Image (spheres, rainbow, N blue to C red):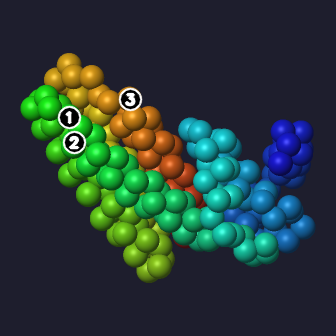
Amino acid sequence: MDLSLSLSIFLSLLFQKCSVPALAATTNEPPDALIYVVCFQTKNESLCQEALRSYPLPPEGLDFKILCQASIAVSNADAKSTYNLIGSLKRNESDPKILHELDLCLYAYELSIRGIAKANNSLIARDYDGLYKIAVNNQVIESNCETGFVEKGLDEPIQLKEAGKKFQDLGDITVVIAKHLKDMKH
């Protein structure tokens, strides 16, 4: 979607004083307008659009629940990929201090993968408050990986730093969507 079309959709929604929940139920908006609205609120709009569009979405009937399923699936795949990256980094590392931090990162990503499964269960159960809390908590858990390196004055491997940033940005998509679901419920 080009910027002018995106901007015109956003401005038309703003001028119509259309709430985001109403957009989800609107049939005369472009099918991907909800993706634009969600991604506009994230820290990395282009990654958000790429991630949500990479998931097989229905051509019609797009809503926050479907987008949340997509963001959870993409985050899960990314967390598993980062977990495997950490294992690979460990095999090629000899510094015991860095190895210790990598072990802590493995544990953080293990917890994040479990958290993503819990988030999916909360979505299925329509426990949007729980979904939101889990999504926020997952971001805190992952940030412990980077914090360990920083606090000990160690150089975090660049691949891990980049993967952590991507995981945070993907998790932000789930946080934004979960907040909408939670707010719509109340």
Question: Would you place residue 110 above or below residue 128 in this image?
Answer: above
Is disc 3 in contact with disc 1, using a CB cutoff of under 8 Å? no
Determine the residue located farthest toward the left in the rendered image. 96
Q: For numbered disc 2, what is the local secondary structure? A: helix
Residue 89 percent across, percent down from the top left: 27, 40
State the residue in front, 102 or 61.
102
Spatial CA distance of label 2 from label 1 is 5 Å
The residue that label 1 is drawn on is 93
Amino acid type indicated by mark 2: Lys
Q: For numbered disc 3, what is the local secondary structure? A: helix
Residue beneath the point at 65% across and 59% down: 54
Residue beneath the point at 42% across and 41% down: 163
The residue that label 2 is drawn on is 90
| Camera-side mark, 3 or 1 | 1
Amino acid type indicated by mark 1: Glu
Q: Residues within 10 Å of mark 2 (few under 14, many from 20)?
A: some
Amino acid type indicated by mark 3: Ile
Spatial CA distance of label 3 from label 1 is 13 Å
